[in-house]
Image (cartoon, rainbow, N blue to C red):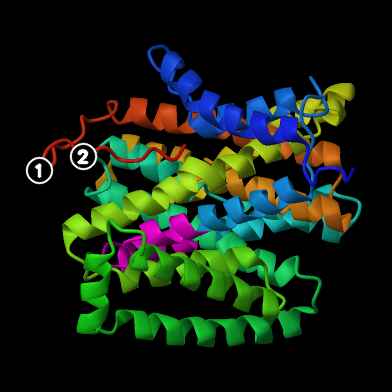
């Protein structure tokens, strides 16, 4: 009898962890607001090989995890509103990220016996979890405000900048070749963006509306094709797939920009259902299963790295964002912006995974970085909300209560 391609127990436990995560977050919410992603990773650690040993990561689950990562980056790109971000917000966010990048890479190179390996470790400190802070800002009613625009710009640069750096530094190519390949991708992406901004033909608008609630699902299938095409292009050009997925989200957002609002809400809910309802939780639960808890706990020195990295997130990522924020925001808002900027987890998981597989980073150091990222997601958005006076109640939708799909 042929052995199954995937462990049946793992196949059940991973969606069970994904289901338990929002339940636990909801029960704890009356005392402490804990993002769902933290529970997804913690539950993955719990059922994984380092604790209970109930579930193992095989080829199928690894593949689904990669799809989840691609969908995570896609949704981050899809959420961006470039009309509100252009000009001052994006310039200030870009300047603060460049300061972070310079200091983080330099500090990493000086701190490690191998300057190159230290540089790669420093790259993980330059990230911001845009997908994590966007739902928090949205639920608090902050997105339409100047603070929300600045926070979104900071998150966008903190997501897109490291993806570009990953493509240049971690692709295995020579820097000059990587730059040429990246330029080629930029040209192809520019052509796709230009096409996406053109008015849609009448037949496409008609077909989107006609199949919105049928098995045809033309809009969703179009978006999935864009995602697949851009990821395939990035892989074909020997770039990281994250760049393709993030760009696909931007293209899809422009492509569907002129869709009627009611239809846009339905399409967005379907995409969030595919991403946050299925694929993205698989990525985070599997990341928890791959988390090297044993290496973190066996060495007290490694365990001490966790609060050290958390402090570095604040100093290297949060402080420049706060200092370069517009003075009009006020002191409390600037500190809150710095806390949001220092919130980092998804790309920390991605970058450390790439670096460990390439031999540039010890698994114990990677575990400390991911642990610090988990603490940043748990603590920093909560502190930022407290500084700004807590979450505002959601604005009622004119057609009745509109429930946003919570990502993490």
Which residue is situated farthest in the front direction here? 1
Q: Dominant secondary structure of the magenta stretch?
A: helix
- Depth check: give the residue in front, 274 or 95: 274
CA distance separating discs 1 and 2: 8 Å
- Depth check: give the residue in front, 8 or 29: 8
Q: Does 245 sit above or below residue 76?
A: below
Instruction: Return the x and y of residue 179 as percentages of the image width and height.
Output: 67, 82
Mark 1 near mark 2, Cβ–Cβ under 8 Å? yes
Which residue is situated farthest in the left direction here? 398
- State yes or no: residue 376 in magenta: no
Q: Say if residue 204 shows up in the picture.
A: yes
Residue 406 position by quadrant? top left
What residue does disc 2 label? 402
Which residues are drawn in magenta?
Answer: 74-95
Instruction: Return the x and y of residue 102 as percentages of the image width and height.
Output: 64, 60
Residue at 32% from the left image edge and 63% from the top image edge: 85
What residue does disc 1 label? 399
Residue at 16% from the left image edge and 37% from the top image edge: 395
Q: Does 44 sit above or below residue 26?
A: below
Taking 373 as reference, is 205 left or right?
left
Q: Secondary structure at mark 2?
A: loop
- Please identify the quadrant where the N terminus is shown: top right
Q: Secondary structure at mark 1?
A: loop
């Amino acid at each position: 009898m042929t052995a199954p391609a995937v462990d049946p127990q793992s196949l059940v436990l991973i969606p069970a962890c994904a289901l338990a995560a929002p339940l636990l977050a909801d029960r704890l919410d009356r005392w402490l607001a804990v993002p769902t992603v933290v529970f997804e990773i913690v539950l993955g650690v719990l059922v994984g090989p380092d604790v209970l040993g109930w579930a193992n990561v095989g080829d199928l689950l690894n593949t689904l995890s990669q799809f989840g990562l691609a969908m995570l980056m896609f949704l981050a790109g899809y959420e961006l509103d470039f009309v509100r971000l252009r000009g001052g917000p994006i310039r200030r966010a870009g300047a603060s990220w460049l300061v972070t990048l310079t200091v983080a890479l330099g500090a990493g190179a000086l701190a490690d016996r191998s300057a190159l390996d230290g540089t790669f470790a420093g790259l993980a400190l330059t990230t911001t979890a845009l997908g994590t802070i966007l739902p928090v800002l949205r639920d608090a009613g902050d997105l339409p405000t100047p603070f929300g625009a600045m926070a979104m710009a900071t998150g966008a640069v903190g997501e897109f900048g490291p993806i570009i750096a990953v493509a240049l530094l971690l692709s295995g190519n020579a820097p000059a070749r990587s730059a040429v390949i990246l330029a080629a991708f930029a040209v192809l992406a520019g052509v796709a963006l230009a096409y996406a901004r053109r008015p849609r033909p009448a037949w496409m608008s008609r077909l989107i509306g006609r199949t919105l609630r049928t098995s045809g699902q033309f809009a969703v299938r179009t978006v999935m094709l864009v995602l697949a095409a851009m990821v395939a292009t990035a892989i074909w050009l020997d770039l990281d797939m994250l760049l393709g997925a993030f760009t696909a989200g931007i293209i899809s957002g422009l492509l569907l920009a002129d869709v009627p609002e009611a239809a846009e809400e339905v399409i967005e809910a379907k995409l969030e259902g595919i991403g946050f309802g299925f694929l993205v939780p698989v990525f985070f639960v599997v990341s928890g299963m791959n988390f090297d808890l044993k290496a973190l706990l066996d060495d007290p020195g490694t365990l001490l790295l966790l609060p050290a990295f958390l402090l570095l997130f604040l100093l290297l990522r949060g402080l420049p964002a706060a200092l370069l924020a517009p003075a009009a925001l006020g002191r409390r808002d600037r500190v809150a912006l710095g806390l949001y900027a220092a919130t980092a987890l998804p790309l920390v998981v991605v970058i450390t995974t790439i670096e460990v597989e390439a031999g540039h980073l010890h698994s114990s150091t990677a575990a400390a970085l991911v642990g610090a990222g988990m603490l940043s997601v748990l603590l920093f958005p909560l502190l930022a909300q407290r500084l700004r006076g807590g979450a505002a109640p959601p604005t009622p939708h004119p057609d009745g209560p509109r429930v946003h799909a919570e990502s993490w």
